[in-house]
Image (cartoon, rainbow, N blue to C red):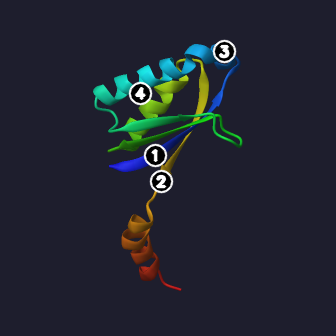
Amino acid sequence: MDKYFVLMTVTDAGALALDTAADSLDAVRERVENEGHIGSATIYLLMGGPFDLIAECEASSVEGAAYFAVELAKTGLVRTMTQKAITVGKFDTEIRQRLGKMAP
């Protein structure tokens, strides 16, 4: 499974519902996991910087990660942006090999 990060900012509606927003987002995470669209996922709250929340998830396809992000956004509590992560090990075994095969 590949790893994805869903970067989130709180919407105006999310700001008004901060006391219940975490439970709502966690319920989405649990449902999407149980449906099999993603493997495990963790949502981290109150990040520093330009994003308020970040979710780390494993998915066997980009479609599974996208479904997770869309379901989070459909709550109206957050806006999402999804990024695929490549581990250092995968970079070494796959990408570096491809770069070595490229003509100068």
Secondary structure at numbered mark 1: strand
Q: For mark 3, what is the residue? A: 13
Q: Pointer 1 and pointer 2: residues touching (CB < 8 Å)? A: yes
* Image location of residue 99, percent across then percent down: 46, 77
- Which one is earlier in the sequence, the residue at label 4 or at label 1? 1
Q: CA distance from mark 4 to mark 2?
A: 19 Å
Q: Secondary structure at mark 4?
A: helix
Residue type, label 2: Ala
Dot 3 amino acid type: Ala
Three-letter amino acid code at disc 1?
Tyr
View extreme (bottom): residue? 104
User: CA separation, marks 1 and 2?
Assistant: 5 Å
Q: Is residue 28 above or below residue 85?
A: above
First in sequence: mark 4 vs mark 2: 4
Q: What is the number of the mark on residue 29?
A: 4
- Disc 1/disc 3 C-alpha distance (Å): 25 Å
Residue at x 49%, y 32% (from the top left corner):
69
Residues under labels 3 and 4: Cα distance?
A: 19 Å
Is disc 1 in contact with disc 3, using a CB cutoff of under 8 Å? Answer: no
Q: Is residue 18 above or below residue 60?
A: above
Q: At 39% across and 65% down in the image, what residue appears? A: 90
Q: Earlier in the sequence, mark 1 or mark 2?
A: 1
Image location of residue 89, percent across then percent down: 39, 67
User: Residue 85 got which mark?
Assistant: 2
